[in-house]
Image: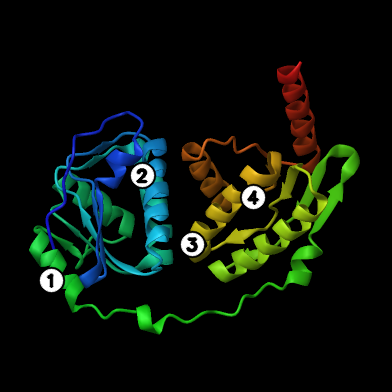
Amino acid sequence: MGQLNRGATLHDKDFTTAEIDARITFHEDDQIMEVSFAGMELASSAQVNRFYDRIEERIAATGEKLWFFLVDYRDARIDSAAWFAHSRRGKELNMAHSMGSVRFDASEVTRRQIEQNAGTENFDPNLFYDRDSAVGRLRELPSKREKVVERTPNLTAEEVAARLSFLPELQVMDVDFTDLVLQYSGDVDVLYDVIEEKIGATGRKWYFLINYEGTRIHSPAWVRYAARGKRLNLNWSLGSVRYAPGSETEADIRLRAESQDFRPNIRNTRAEALERIAEMKAEQEEEVG
């Protein structure tokens, strides 16, 4: 396996796709995805989210769901403003796609941050000072690709359909995710397959009004949920407003919004959400006028 091109130091700026791609390498023989934060200073949550968005896209493009993760932290600095996003997006990515993760050459500052995030001062057998040791550890781990179990979705198409309604007079698709639990990517696909079918049958775009009260989206489902949601919005949405999300779901929505160029439009109540949709209509009418 060759060494990764570390690229230029990036600080407080937008990442280009080429800059991020230069830091992501797939070593197919060892089933390893290598990601380099070497020489980087991640100063903002938005930077982190753009980086992780691209990692997810690159993994999807391989056609393989599972990889070993090799992460290079040489001379890396992750500012406090970026740590929450880095930790949360990293957890989601690991839950969805990792067969095992190791980090190497972490500075003492980064090491302490990682240990603190892991919740124990004894962390971490998978944190190494050199790349060869990290790669050696990954090569000891068993591949899970042949052991992937396709879990039966917990959702049915009928259950999803019952959560959708269209309000033509308001140009609104009303989506009720109350107490919905999405555990795995299969649940996400059932959900969005039905939504796309129903909205496609109308032949028009809608404002999306989404009730997130009691909704739980588990880490293994978040990567697929974000990708399918983005596609749905691009194809069929005039604008989306969400209300009553729990703290966990709200945090994830706000993180994704930072890097995917959409306003989270989160409100506390349905009435406030409908008011926001009315505002969006007025704003769009002014732009057309």
| Marks 3 and 2 in Cβ contact (< 8 Å) | no
Cα separation, mark 4 vs mark 2, equals: 22 Å
Q: Residues within 10 Å of mark 1 (few under 14, many from 20)?
A: few
Image coordinates of residue 55 in percent, x first then y, are 36, 52
| Secondary structure of the residue carrying numbered label 4 | helix
| Secondary structure of the residue carrying numbered label 1 | helix
Residue wearing tag 2: 51
Residue 76 image-quadrant placement: top left
| Secondary structure of the residue carrying numbered label 2 | helix
Q: Answer yes or no: is residue 177 visible.
A: no
Image coordinates of residue 91 in percent, x first then y, are 39, 58
**Residue lying at the far right of the rendered structure:** 169
Image coordinates of residue 116 in percent, x first then y, are 29, 53
Residue wearing tag 1: 136
Residue 77 image-quadrant placement: top left
Q: From the image, state whether disc 1 or disc 3 is nearer to you.
A: 1
Cα separation, mark 3 vs mark 4, equals: 20 Å
Q: Earlier in the sequence, mark 4 or mark 1?
A: 1
Q: From the image, state whether disc 3 or disc 4 is nearer to you.
A: 4
> Residue 266 or 200: which is nearer the viewer?
200
Q: Is residue 225 left or right of residue 80?
A: right
Cα separation, mark 1 vs mark 3, equals: 28 Å
Image coordinates of residue 236 in percent, x first then y, are 70, 45
Q: From the image, state whether disc 4 or disc 2 is nearer to you.
A: 4
Q: Earlier in the sequence, mark 2 or mark 1?
A: 2
Residue 234 image-quadrant placement: top right
| Marks 4 and 1 in Cβ contact (< 8 Å) | no
Give the number of the disc on residue 232.
4
> Callout 3, which amino acid?
Ser
Give the number of the disc on residue 219.
3
